[in-house]
Amino acid sequence: MFRADASRLERFLRKFLYRTISYHDYSENFYHALLVGLFALDERGTACSNVESGLGRPDLLVVDEDNGKAVIIEVKVAATEQQLEAAALQGLTQIRTRRYAQPLLEPGEEQIFACGIAFWKRNVWSGAFCW
């Protein structure tokens, strides 16, 4: 994730979802907790769920202080498969409008990767941008 490669993350998550989850697991809280768990396993950063930042609380904030990188993730669940892209873009818009990156923006200190991730059953779509 710290490579700012949304398409690689998307491929990994899609494969992971097809191998691991049940049709009973299609809620935003489930996907949120799944991502927190996956990022908590990565020793390069500290994963925080719903921590206050900017004008709200992003679903997931992962900070790698040693390398000056951060990842902000907003999770959405699409009502249909056709709405995956729009839902992910809604997550990105939320990151921008609620200024989740603001506390991390100190000149030369952080490379910030923002990612809106939308789920629909076992499918996923992600959109991203970097500061």
Image: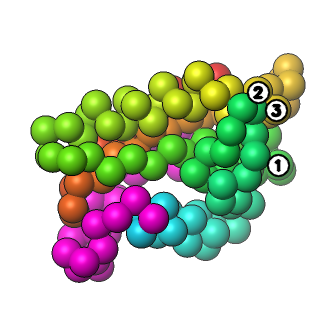
Gap in Å between the C-alphas at discs 3 and 2?
Answer: 4 Å
> Disc 1 marks which amino acid?
Glu
Badge 3 is on which residue? 103
Instruction: Please report the residue visible at 20 percent of the width from the left and 37 percent of the height from the top.
Output: 83
Q: Find out whether residue 13 is within the magenta segment.
A: yes
Q: Is residue 102 left or right of residue 1?
A: right
Gap in Å between the C-alphas at discs 2 and 1?
Answer: 16 Å
Instruction: Please report the residue visible at 22 percent of the width from the left and 63 percent of the height from the top.
Output: 122
Q: Is residue 100 left or right of residue 5?
A: right
Q: Position of residue 68 (x, y in %)?
A: 79, 40
Secondary structure at badge 1 equals loop
Question: Is residue 59 among the parts visible in the rendering?
Answer: yes
Q: Main secondary structure of the magenta part?
A: helix
**Mark 3 or mark 1, whichever is nearer to me:** 3
- Asked if the residue at tag 2 contacts the one at tag 3, i.e. Cβ–Cβ closer than 8 Å, the answer is yes
Badge 1 is on which residue? 65
> Disc 2 marks which amino acid?
Gln
Secondary structure at badge 3 equals helix
Q: Position of residue 58 (x, y in %)?
A: 62, 45
**Mark 2 or mark 1, whichever is nearer to me:** 2
Gap in Å between the C-alphas at discs 3 and 1?
Answer: 14 Å
Question: Is residue 7 among the parts visible in the rendering?
Answer: no
In the image, residue 73 above or below residue 120: above
